[in-house]
Amino acid sequence: MKILLDSNVLIAAFATRGLCHTLFEQSIYRHEVISSREIPAEVAKNLKKKLKLPQNLVEETVSYIEESATLIVPQPLNQKPCRDPNDVHVPNLALTAGCDYLVTGDDDLLTLKKIEDIPIVSPRTFWPILRSSVTIDK
């Protein structure tokens, strides 16, 4: 299964040891996590600016994300599928990579419910889906 974890899910994964952390760890061990250069960059910016993490910890976190994920260059879509123009790269990435799920906490993306045939779900909604998947697709 190909899973796109949005930057807000990754930030939560490294800020706390809760559901998002478990989703990230289970996803990288059991499936293929999709990312792009933009997502780890956004994670780094927020970990440093909002959470005030030291630069070395931010760099380690970004390196771990980049090493654990398949990095894809998103292709532009013909239409803007979401309300926030800063989020357009996320559904573009999901479509380019042929993701099975886009997992996000962003309401602008969640309101879409899906992009083409890719479900857009919250971490809480994705958790039982991930738990029930038993195959390793890597």
Image (cartoon, rainbow, N blue to C red):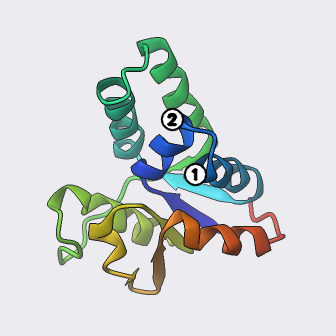
Q: Is residue 17 left or right of residue 45?
A: right
Q: Can residue 115 be seen in this view?
A: yes
Reading the image, the residue beneath label 1 is 20
Q: In which quarter of the image is the N terminus?
A: bottom right
Residue 3's x, y, as percent? 57, 63
Q: How many marks?
A: 2
Residue 95 lies in quadrant: bottom left
Helix, strand or loop at label 2? It is helix
Of the image marks 2 and 1, the number of the one nearer the N terminus: 2
Helix, strand or loop at label 1? It is helix
Going by the numbered disc 2, the residue's amino acid type is Ala
Q: Is residue 42 left or right of residue 14?
A: left
Q: In which quarter of the image is the C terminus?
A: bottom right
Residue 110 lies in quadrant: bottom left
Residue lying at 71% horizontally and 60% vertically, measured from the top left: 31
Spot the residue most to the bottom.
117
Q: Is residue 92 visible?
A: no
Check the image and report above or below for 3 versus 68. Answer: below
Check the image and report above or below for 41 versus 120. Answer: above
Q: Distance between the residues labelled 2 and 1?
A: 9 Å
Residue 16's x, y, as percent? 56, 38
Residue 22's x, y, as percent? 68, 50
Residue lying at 38% horizontally and 53% vertically, measured from the top left: 73
Going by the numbered disc 1, the residue's amino acid type is Cys
Residue lying at 31% horizontally and 30% vertically, measured from the top left: 50
Q: How would you rate the neighbour count of disc 2 (Cα within 10 Å): few for under 14, some for 14-19, many for 20 or more?
A: some
Spot the residue most to the right.
134
Reading the image, the residue beneath label 2 is 15
